[in-house]
Image: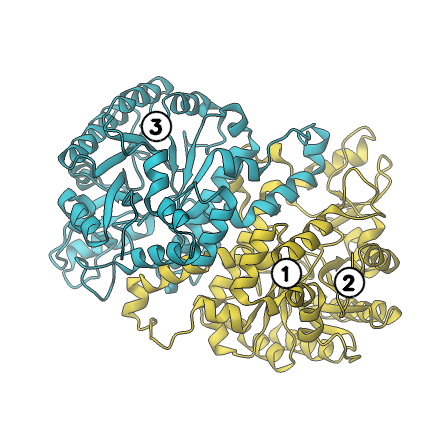
Chain colours: A cyan, B yellow
Amino acid sequence: MASPASGIVDIHTHMYPPSYVEIMESRTTIPIVRKFPQASDPRLILLEEEVKSLEDALKDPQAKVPGRPLTTHYSSVQQKIHFMDTHGIQKSVVSLANPWLDFLDASESPAIAKKINEEFSDLCGQYPRRLFFFAALPLTASLEDILSSVEHVRGLKYCRGVILGTSGLGKGLDDPRLLPVYKALAESKLPIFLHPHYGLPSEVWGDRAGEYGHVLPLALGFPMETTIAVTRMFLAGVFDEVRELQIILAHSGGTLPFLAGRIESCVVHDGQLLREGKLAKSRRTVWDVLKEQIYLDAVVYSPTSLKLAAESSGADRVMFGTDHPFFPPLETDEQGEWESVTWNTAAIRKATEGKSVETEAILGGNATRVLRLDEEF
Amino acid sequence: MASPASGIVDIHTHMYPPSYVEIMESRTTIPIVRKFPQASDPRLILLEEEVKSLEDALKDPQAKVPGRPLTTHYSSVQQKIHFMDTHGIQKSVVSLANPWLDFLDASESPAIAKKINEEFSDLCGQYPRRLFFFAALPLTASLEDILSSVEHVRGLKYCRGVILGTSGLGKGLDDPRLLPVYKALAESKLPIFLHPHYGLPSEVWGDRAGEYGHVLPLALGFPMETTIAVTRMFLAGVFDEVRELQIILAHSGGTLPFLAGRIESCVVHDGQLLREGKLAKSRRTVWDVLKEQIYLDAVVYSPTSLKLAAESSGADRVMFGTDHPFFPPLETDEQGEWESVTWNTAAIRKATEGKSVETEAILGGNATRVLRLDEEF
């Protein structure tokens, strides 16, 4: 597979660096990391319903281990580089995996954020020109501490943005208390990589959800959570208030590209919004915001959906990603090619067939330009 | 605007027939219809949070009236025909609007279902060859009563399927107790028109949702609810169990066409499904089911999204709809053209540009064929 001139760039790729794993090892509430005699890898426990089986598995060596294996893919930078080499990826912009720092006490989160972001910076420094990162912010801390963290990470050599969940300061991303943070990020030219984390209540999956593995919360919950979060930002006027804010949406915008027309129709047909004078002709539509302030990753596993993503925000605003180390192959060697990656490269090539400029842009050119990956600092 | 040979057919168009309005007038819990001196039309109150302001508005003639106006568009068949004529619609397959019969006691729902379905049949009889309908089932009643209702509606001359919400018998559409109903519908060649109804918990819209009118639950909640419901059916194996079951998804599948690739990826990467032997090579994928058992309406307000819908399930499986009488124009005469309709006709024409066979199929040909609208019975 021939690589584009700028090389393939992966903007959606996670790590739990060693000090973050240590934190999870010391905790008794999620997220937790525990070792079990009956499993070769430590287990990563992210969900409340997995905690119940934790005690059983520690007591009974026959019991099923909870959570997911925390392989070296999650914490080893050498493994990240091997994965990149295997898939022809020249550069990666790594980010802390969920749930980031959102579970930490306000008293500890600023110091931990500083430590983790510096650790990411050091990891990137081990492979200059190949690794960059999105920093994590201590959102449970005071506004002052959060803004200090933005100031800190903008000074880190390989930092190219911040990764954010959808809870913000606890009340979502349309919380007006976040405006100073958005403004600081915009002024620092640090885009937000918006990423979901089991944000829909589990009742929506119904009584039989357990029979379907993790499919419902991952396949539907994640993209729906992202769509809700960014639509709330749009309706709250965040994009108008902070015109320089740039946001990269995980999983090709969740479902935003497909629902953009319906959102617009519901807005222009809403009596309350009309009465409140919110439907001015000069109003920017979802389509405008998609093309001016939103970027999408290409993690959508379908050429037709990828085509819609590229038509929605522009082929110059969509960027390849892998979601590594999640979705490893179940039946082939984890050191080899991952189908969860090749589906997405194939989708990009198919969706942009006959338009090699777009293929190269989505595989790497856009990320290189938008995230300044040709610049050392 | 030139009409296609088969005429334009609207498969997504609702009514509250007179006897249903009477039921809502007599109720004290939602859905409720009430008249207020300060409003010209009766008000339709569908949401729990609207009930609070109901008492205030009845006492204080200055107070804001709750809910939405129940104009003649909701209950008058002459108004439906006028609306169809205004938009060049030759045939409509009308259906009861949400929340259908899902709020009725088991003791009363079979008789009311019978009455309402016969009323629909009579309404259609007033305009033969122009009106058909999707029947409503008494899902709160016993299985025996539900099956009797299927038997009843299959004998009604203008009935062409049934409209169903996502709650089923109270536990969603992946409830195994529904299998006999699905089988009876399949044997009767009655497709399900699957339609959402405020099925996501309101907490997901956040503290500021009230500032955004009805946009979040309508624009996002409705399509997400549909997507969750049909994906649960897929994962439960309903489509394999009842191969002849045909289902028409409202709002172009909610978000199913966009998320199909992600659903497939999450399925093939799910360790539990693998261990349980659910990932056999012969397994039918979401893509297969989309092309074999699912139809989509074209109510998506966007040419690019419509193109994805047509690519997902096939241009021979997408059917025009209006969602009338919802989304009336706010600033122009309700008796004239509705923008919520013209957006969708324009989207169809744009998405199928240069392919007039597909344009005609989506505007009317598919519905005529699939729902046997050329047949009198």
- Of the two numbered discs 2 and 1 on the same chain, state the one appearing first in sequence: 2
Please say if B6 is above or below A373.
Answer: below
For residue A315, which quarter of the picture? top left
Please say if B306 is above or below A7.
Answer: below
Q: Which mark is residue B354?
A: 1
**In this figure, which residue is indicated by the disc labeled 2?**
B3
Q: Nearer the viewer, mark 3 or mark 1?
A: 1
Residue at left 53%, top 39%?
A231
**In this figure, which residue is indicated by the disc labeled 3?**
A140
Q: Please, what is the three-letter code of the amino acid marked with disc 3?
A: Thr
Labels 2 and 1 positioned on one and the same chain: yes
Cα–Cα span, label 3 and label 1: 55 Å
Given the image, what chain letter belongs to the residue carrying mark 1? B
- Nearest the eye: A298 or B352: B352
The answer to whether residue B297 is left or right of residue A228 is right
Callout 1: SS: loop
| Residue B297 showing in the rendered view | yes
- Nearest the eye: A58 or A194: A194
Please say if B348 is above or below A195.
Answer: below
Residue at left 40%, top 20%?
A187
